[in-house]
Amino acid sequence: MNEEHPAAHLQESVAALRRRATFAVVGLAAAMLARGIDLVLREWSIVLLEPVRASGEAASPELLAQLTTADATIDAIVVAVTVTFVVTGFFFIRWMHRLVALTRALGATIPWTPSQAGWAFIIPFISLVRPYQVLSSTRAALEPENVAPPAPRVDPSAQGDYRSTAFIVPAPAQRLPAALIGLWWGAFLVLSLGGRLLPKDMSTVDKVVSAYQMSMFVDAAALVAGALAITVVRGLTARLEERFRRIRASTPEALAAQGIELGA
């Protein structure tokens, strides 16, 4: 494609978005791993505590040693959960900032700026709805059909003779259901609220078991939210790349006819 194309200067920014998406996905996977380990360890601790809970007798020295090991491991995993959550949040916000900036640069209209996208998770109360609003609006703005697809082109490597012509037909655009973003955000809110409601009182075996069961529920919500977040990151990145591909395959005249005005 001619490097003088009006979208050529965005090539590196699109590649940078892809890299940021990769970091976000890796961070989400690491956070899910930490949550999964935490869930298993808490279930193990509950199993260890069950004989004590049922009999009301003191734990044997052997059981006490196992419980001490389980508690120490859980404490270490809690640190890992916190670290991966913070790091993943950083990567996710950087990806969302670049996604919004590129969406606007590729001529799509959204009511949010990159700065608003970056602060979406941080400002109290607004953070309850703004991330969903930003990504939902971006998804709609990146609807592939908003830009005409490139026309089929002749495949010179598959030509037999002058009477047969092979064409390369562009692959259909990847779909991303709007409900998926809502499900992700709902799971994230459950995770956030559940984390704030975790019991602090560990004075009895029953209270420890109840607290661990609640923590396991939060871990499960985190696993669901993480899996959905990975799908959202990949899906929105693919939609933007598809818009960029279609724009690069269009002439400036064709873009003007569609009312698409590219930014910096």
Image (spheres, rainbow, N blue to C red):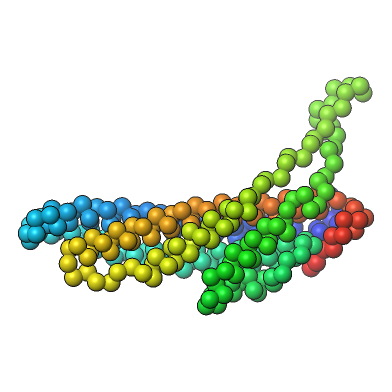
Say if 145 sits above or below 214 in the image: above
Q: Where residue 32 appears, x then y in whole percent?
A: 43, 55
Please give the count of numbered marks on the rendered protein: 0
Q: Residue at x 38, y 60 (%)?
A: 218
Q: Is residue 148 left or right of residue 189?
A: right
- Which image quadrant is residue 53 in? bottom left
Say if 153 sits above or below 229 in the image: above
Say if 104 sits above or below 119 in the image: above
Q: Where residue 153 appears, x then y in whole percent?
A: 85, 37
Q: Residue at x 52, y 78 (%)?
A: 124
Q: Residue at x 43, y 58 (%)?
A: 222
Residue 199 in view in this figure: yes
Q: Is residue 57 left or right of residue 19?
A: left
Q: Where residue 6 appears, x then y in whole percent?
A: 85, 60
Which quadrant is home to the C terminus? bottom right
Q: Where residue 81 appears, x then y in whole percent?
A: 39, 63
